[in-house]
């Protein structure tokens, strides 16, 4: 049992990171929020307003580390550090650098101390700051990198390294120009890493959930694929050469086995026409947005990784635990935490943390919160029960005398897993997770019938493991420790 004490203090800024400085003092860093000039030329200050800002337009805190553009938009990096062990007292504002942005703001920085002892901060953005400077960004998403010898180094010691990663890809829509990185999480030194801790995991939020890339990167280098290479798409863009790194106009690909995927397959759904055409696995799936326009919602998003007690999640080996937002268009909650690991072949593995076992009871009882552990052994005929069917599983949240239930299972023929809540009592109230219904006020679409949330069947095809936690609101499952699927039932 953990008891929290409210000390009455808050830091009124945006999402970011917590990291110890070189003395061990815990510091919080985040983007400072928008600073811009109004139509009349007056300045609008951010929530963590820097008294050193002087006037408009384009008079920034510091031009050091500029992303090659002048703009009235100002999004300074902001650091503040705790001065006591209870984290109830924090020192004044520190501004290491200001990434000049042509658009509203750069999203959610990530920070770490790497193997060379240097401090790094990566800022989520897009790749158009030095090209078209228009939205949506046709050049894709990007992470820009800065480094300094100490976390609280003066501004002149923060060096702009350029883009450590630029891509148009995600696992579902190759070369689609999603447009920007949104609330990424960056971690490394994951348990079981066959590369001795060199593999690093970068996540990004897309419309359907949390997409990830597995690669290698250290000490200010580019984030490369798992083989340590850049599979370049397009040619180098001289306008994107900042200082140390080079971004490509066409970006680069992560298309090796296991190099890209979804932490949770969220709002990915079955593509009925693809299945009818004989497609399987990833090719049998589609984004909810493609199948049912207007259903852009990520039921597993804004993922964050917790690591070493020191706050180091990248270069310090040890346990890595991921949490996220889950929910729908009307409410949200924190996900059940998942332990991350890597298989001997380098695939990302996940499992619910063992601490959840403390909630188990010694005897059965009526409850709306329960755990399901399933193991299916596939016969030579291809079905778990020896029948001719390739679709099997179990149902939860059923109502006696009705067909109301949420169905969890596997479709071997299509090569997918599913958590199908179409028969739950919540579809009318929550169309995001029941995509056979279009959002109000549009009427149901006949072409959307038969669509339900699904993910690829990864790992063993002959012995399939499924682990689920169920309550009145969520059904959260992991198949073969590889495919996560979270579904809301309200």
Image (cartoon, grey):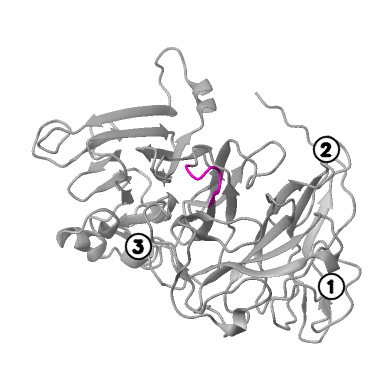
Q: Which of the marked residues, 3 or 1, is nearer the chain's N terminus?
A: 1
Residue at horizontal 43 percent and vertical 41 percent from the top: 349
> Residue 461 location, x and y as percent?
24, 40
Which mark sits nearer the N-terminus, 3 or 2? Answer: 2
Residue 457 visible? The answer is yes
> Marks 3 and 1: CB-CB under 8 Å?
no
Pointers 3 and 2 in contact (CB under 8 A)?
Answer: no
Could you tell which of marks 1 and 2 lies nearer the N-terminus?
A: 2
Please say if 466 is above or below 425: above
- Is residue 133 in view from this perspective? no
Which is nearer the eye, 317 or 431? Answer: 317
The C terminus appears in which quarter of the rendering?
A: top left
Give how far apart the Cα atoms at labels 3 and 1 are. Answer: 47 Å
Query: Is 196 covered by the magenta stretch?
Result: yes
Residue 208: x, y in percent?
A: 43, 58
Q: Which residue is mark 3?
A: 438
Which residues are the magenta region? 194-200
Q: Is 455 in the magenta? A: no
Name which residue lies at 74% across and 55% down. 119
Q: Which residue is mark 1?
A: 61
Residue, disc 2: 7
**CA distance for labels 3 and 2:** 45 Å
User: Relative to residue 359, is residue 363 drawn left or right?
Assistant: left
Q: Secondary structure at mark 2?
A: loop
Q: Is residue 95 above or below residue 477?
A: below
**Numbered circle sitting on residue 468:** none
Residue 277 or 122: which is nearer the viewer? 122
Quadrant for the N terminus in the image: top right
């Amino acid at each position: 049992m953990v008891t929290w004490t409210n000390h009455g203090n808050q830091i009124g800024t945006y999402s970011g990171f917590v990291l110890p400085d070189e003395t061990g003092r815990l510091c919080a860093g985040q983007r400072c929020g928008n600073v811009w000039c109004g139509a009349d030329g007056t300045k609008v200050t951010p929530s963590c307003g820097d008294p050193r800002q002087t006037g408009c337009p384009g008079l920034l805190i510091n031009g050091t580390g500029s992303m090659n553009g002048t703009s009235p938009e100002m999004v300074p990096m902001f650091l503040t550090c705790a001065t006591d062990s209870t984290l109830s007292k924090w020192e004044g504002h520190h501004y290491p650098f200001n990434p000049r942005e042509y658009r509203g703001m750069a999203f959610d920085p990530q920070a770490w101390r790497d193997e060379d002892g240097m401090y790094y901060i990566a800022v989520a953005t897009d790749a158009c700051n030095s090209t078209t400077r228009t939205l949506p960004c046709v050049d894709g998403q990007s992470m820009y990198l800065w480094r300094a010898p100490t976390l609280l180094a003066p501004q002149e010691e923060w060096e702009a390294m350029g883009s450590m990663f630029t891509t148009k890809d995600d696992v579902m829509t190759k070369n689609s120009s999603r447009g920007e990185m949104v609330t990424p999480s960056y971690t490394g030194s994951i348990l079981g890493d066959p590369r001795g801790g060199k593999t690093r995991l970068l996540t990004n939020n897309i419309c359907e959930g949390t997409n990830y890339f597995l690669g290698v990167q250290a000490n200010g280098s580019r984030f490369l694929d798992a083989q340590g290479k850049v599979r370049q798409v397009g040619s180098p863009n001289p306008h994107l050469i900042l200082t140390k790194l080079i971004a490509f106009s066409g970006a680069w690909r992560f298309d090796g086995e296991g190099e890209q995927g979804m932490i949770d397959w969220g709002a990915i759904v079955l593509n009925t026409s693809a299945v009818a055409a004989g497609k399987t696995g990833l090719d049998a799936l589609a984004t909810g947005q493609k199948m049912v326009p207007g259903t852009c919602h990520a039921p597993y998003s804004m993922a964050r990784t917790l690591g070493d007690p020191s706050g180091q999640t990248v270069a310090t080996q040890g346990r890595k635990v991921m949490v996220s937002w889950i929910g729908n268009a009307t409410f949200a909650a924190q996900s059940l935490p998942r332990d991350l690991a890597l298989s001997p072949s380098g695939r990302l593995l996940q499992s619910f943390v063992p601490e959840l076992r403390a909630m188990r009871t010694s005897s059965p009882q009526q409850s709306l919160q329960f755990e399901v552990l399933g193991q299916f052994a596939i016969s030579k005929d291809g079905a778990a029960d020896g029948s001719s069917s390739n679709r099997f599983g179990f149902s939860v949240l059923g109502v006696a005398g009705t067909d109301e239930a949420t169905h969890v299972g596997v479709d071997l023929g299509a090569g997918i897993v599913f958590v199908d809540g179409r028969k739950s009592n919540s579809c009318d109230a929550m169309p995001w997770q029941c995509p056979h219904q279009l959002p109000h006020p549009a009427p149901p679409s006949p072409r959307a019938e038969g669509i339900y949330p699904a993910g690829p069947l990864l790992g063993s095809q002959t012995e399939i493991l499924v682990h689920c936690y169920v309550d009145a609101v969520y059904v959260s499952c992991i198949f073969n420790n590889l495919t996560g699927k979270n579904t809301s039932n309200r």
